[in-house]
Amino acid sequence: MQTVTIIDYGMGNLWSVKNAFEYLDCNVILTNSPKDIEKADTLILPGVGSYGLAMQKLSNLQLDEAILETVNLKKKKILGICLGIQLLTKSSVEDGFTEGLKIIDQSTKKFKFDDKKIRIPHIGFNSVSVQNYKTSLLYKNLPDMCDFYFVHSYYIPTNPIIGNIGVCFYGCDFVASYEKDNIFATQFHPEKSQKNGLKLLKNFLII
């Protein structure tokens, strides 16, 4: 039985994520302890809400330092989900400029559209196309252009970025998923994306 460590900093859809991994026969640890994170082999960084507040909470609990040590130095794998993928970037303009974990070399932007018919936040199922589908580990045995569930008002631009990305279009192209070395993340909620989401989580576990 594989153990996954879900980082609990007080801003996440923890129970739905926990339930999804337990459904996949994982032992799940929910923690806000830096020591637990530094001992982990598999980290999950979920999140819903404000980027600025989330980074403040991570910092106050010294979880930011623990994440960086575990991911950058020990090279343990991490999966960021929704706000979690954004926190992995360099910065965001949400609630004013805030620096992020700087694991993904890109910044998070706010959706802004002249077309008022495009509603913000982006909510619902949308298709994701993987740039290098044949080499993707997250999408193994999933069809290209499969649907996942999104809820977000901020996004990560697709260019420039280093890594294999899944791309979704909602008024503009944005990063729907990211994978490079031991870093994995999704803007969508795999735990709310039915069979496709569970298959993606299962793929992450066996990487």
Image (cartoon, rainbow, N blue to C red):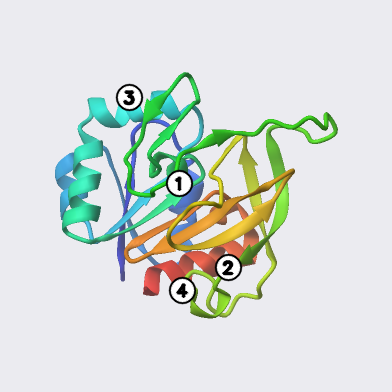
Q: Residues within 10 Å of mark 1 (few under 14, many from 20)?
A: many
Marks 4/1 in contact by CB < 8 Å: the verdict is no
Q: Amino acid at mark 1?
A: Ile
Task: Give percent across and percent down for residue 93.
Answer: 49, 26
Mark number for residue 63?
none
Q: The residue under label 3 is which amino acid type?
A: Gln
Q: Quarter-wise, where is residue 77 in the image? A: bottom left
Q: Nearer the viewer, residue 16 or 87?
A: 87
Q: Secondary structure at mark 2?
A: loop
The circle drawn on residue 85 is 1
Q: Nearer the viewer, residue 105 or 71?
A: 105
Q: CA distance from mark 3 to mark 2?
A: 33 Å
Q: Residues within 10 Å of mark 2 (few under 14, many from 20)?
A: some
Q: Quadrant of the N terminus?
A: bottom left
Q: Of callouts 1 and 2, which one flags the residue occurring earlier in the amino acid sequence?
A: 1
The residue at the point 52 percent across, 67 percent down is 200
Q: CA separation, marks 4 and 1?
A: 17 Å
Give the residue at the far front of this rendering.
Answer: 160
Q: Which residue is mark 3?
A: 56
Quadrant where the image shows the C terminus: bottom left
Label 4 sits on residue: 137
Q: Is residue 42 left or right of residue 81?
A: left
Would you say 162 lies left or right of 2 here? right
13 shown above or below 205: above
User: What is the secondary structure assignment of the residue under circle 3?
Assistant: helix
* Of labels 3 and 2, the one closer to you: 2
Q: What amino acid is found at the position of numbered circle 2 in the picture?
A: Gln
Residue at image location 49% in from the left, 37% down from the top: 108
